[in-house]
Amino acid sequence: MTTSKDLFDDSTMTFGEHLEVLRFYLIRALLGLMVSVIFSLIFGEQLVRMIRQPIDAALRRANVIAAVQDDVKGFDLWTWLTAGIKGQFIPPSVREEDKAALKPLSEDEKRAITIELSAYDLVSMLHDAAPRNFPEPTEAMKEKSVSLPARSEAFRQFRRSAEKIDRPVTLNVQEAFMTYMKVSFIAGLVIASPWMFYQLWLFVAAGLYPHERKYVHTYLPMSVFLFLGGVAFCFYAVLPTVLDFLLSYNAGMELTAQIRISEWISFAVMLPLMFGISFQLPLAMLFLSKINVFQVEHYIAQWRLAVLAIAIISMVLTPTPDPMTMLMMMTPLLVLYGLGIALCKWNVAKSPLGEPA
């Protein structure tokens, strides 16, 4: 009678020798991490600017909207919050001249301003200065205005000072440097993660059966895709909407938001990480189906309980207590729950005689 042969049957390595092999792959993984962190340190400032983009844009929108609320009545907050999920929307009550404030200006544009003058007052001043050259203004000029373009370096300095209101702040001298180092290390860890997982896989693969290796090769890319999809969805869709929702309370209570950069970096790293982890739901459902803990019929029959569980998970994983963040995580998880059911059905359909694939 033939029996399956374990890959370690012919191994003569001792426990100490296995630890030595582990140390070898661990050192290679750490060397890859060190190279990635050094590479990230070179581009640390650009990385910090990239992570700052959502909060910078949200602060600009919040300040413009707060200014509009001062002189526009009937502002509908609910209409604003439900206008879209990308966070790049503008409330219907924002005037055309205020929309321009949301767009960054070039350095040359910052030097220029346009001055609106009454035609009557302008001609009056010219007449007072040179009566022989300029006649007295007529009454019809009182209803007309004149636009005068002006350029000065002082205007650029003034705009730069005003723009600082829309930027995160630091509260001690070393905070900017520590933020730079923290972002560089996290970025280096993300860049080096494929190499580190590969080294771990080289150590673990020797103890796996061929069919177990097949699972890794099949589902590991899917897991990476779901994780990156969750991170991208959070960064480009969830963060702008959540920030607009939270900052709207500052406008309502007439407060000025000054965001500490270290706290924002922690928030901007933690929330996408939680979304990336939660997006592994379809693979977790497939794994539980393969080890016969749950079957497809259980997932379908217990969908109400699953909705409750997803709501609780969304509430626990999101680092803020606001309902907007919870709903933004809960909605895609419900879609992924349906995807998990579809994966389980596909796995059963392609398995012979209904056996797990």
Image (cartoon, rainbow, N blue to C red):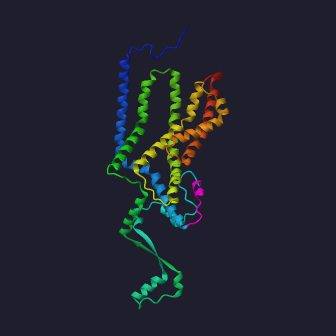
Q: Is residue 279 left or right of residue 350?
A: left
Q: Vertical placement of 350 versus 139: above or below?
A: above
Tell me residue 312's x, y (percent).
Answer: 57, 39
Report if residue 233 lies within the magenta region. Answer: no
Specify the quadrant of the image occupied by residue 111.
bottom left
Tell me, yes or no, if residue 223 can be seen here. Answer: yes
Tell me residue 81's x, y (percent).
Answer: 57, 54
Tell me, yes or no, if residue 43 can be seen here. Answer: no
Specify the quadrant of the image occupied by residue 309.
top right
Specify the quadrant of the image occupied by residue 350.
top right
Q: Is residue 142 left or right of residue 304?
A: left
Of residue 169 and residue 57, the one placed in the foreground of this image is 169
Q: Residue at x 43, y 70 (%)?
A: 113
Q: Which residues are magenta?
A: 72-82
Q: Residue at x 51, y 21 (%)?
A: 210
Q: Residue furthest left?
A: 173
Tell me residue 180's x, y (percent).
Answer: 36, 47
Report if residue 77 lies within the magenta region. Answer: yes
Q: Vertical placement of 128 versus 91: above or below?
A: below
Q: Residue furthest top?
A: 1
Q: Residue at x 38, y 66 (%)?
A: 158
Of residue 260 and residue 98, the one placed in the foreground of this image is 260
